Image (cartoon, helix red, strand yellow):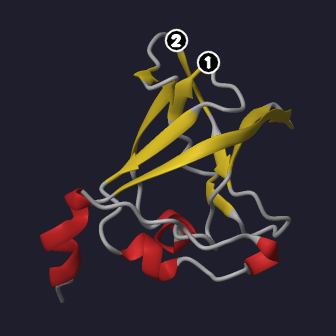
Amino acid sequence: MAEPGRFLVADAGVLETEVVLVAERDGMRWVHLDVGLFSGLAETMGEALRYRISAHRDGEELTGPVEEAVLAGPTCDSVDVLYLRHRPALPSGLRPGDRLRLHGTGAYTTTYSSVGFNGFAPLRELTR
């Protein structure tokens, strides 16, 4: 049917995350974030939602050449992979400490965030 909450507030939310690891595995670039499926991004399960993503370093948006990347969360859980089939194009020079902003996350990320899963704190919410 319809999801009125998503229609009303989807563009209101931006989830900012930090890159904790960039690694090459089986010929694919993997980017691990400090948030994942269990820390607010449950709607990426099955790659159901594909968020628009921008990359930033020191507050400035990163530009230049891009490469596809698998996006994964920080836990040791094999399910904590956000995008495996749909690999977003991210800056080639992306490195730990850079920030990714997932746009259009709406109001659900903080409510989906687990409390203490694998020792990770729930998402911190900032409002303006």
Residue labelled with disc 2 = 65
Which residue corresponds to the image point at 82% horizontal and 34% vertical from the top-left? 23
**N-term-proximal mark, 2 vs 1:** 2
Q: Secondary structure at mark 1?
A: loop
Query: What is the CA distance from the residue labelled 2 to the residue labelled 1?
Result: 6 Å
Residue labelled with disc 1 = 92
Pick the residue in front: 10 or 71.
Answer: 10
Which residue corresponds to the image point at 60% horizontal and 30% vertical from the top-left? 98
* Residue type highlighted by circle 2: Pro
Whether residues under marks 2 and 1 lie with C-beta atoms below 8 angstroms apart, the answer is: yes
13 vs 47, left or right, is left
How many residues crowd mark 2 within 10 Å: few (<14), some (14–19), many (20+)? Answer: few
| Residue 112 in picture, x, y percent from top left | 50, 80
Which residue corresponds to the image point at 63% horizontal and 62% vertical from the top-left? 36
How many residues crowd mark 1 within 10 Å: few (<14), some (14–19), many (20+)? Answer: some
- Above or below for 31 versus 35: above
| Residue 90 in picture, x, y percent from top left | 53, 29
Pick the residue in front: 6 or 125.
Answer: 125
Task: State the residue lying farthest toward the top.
Answer: 64
- Above or below for 54 versus 36: above
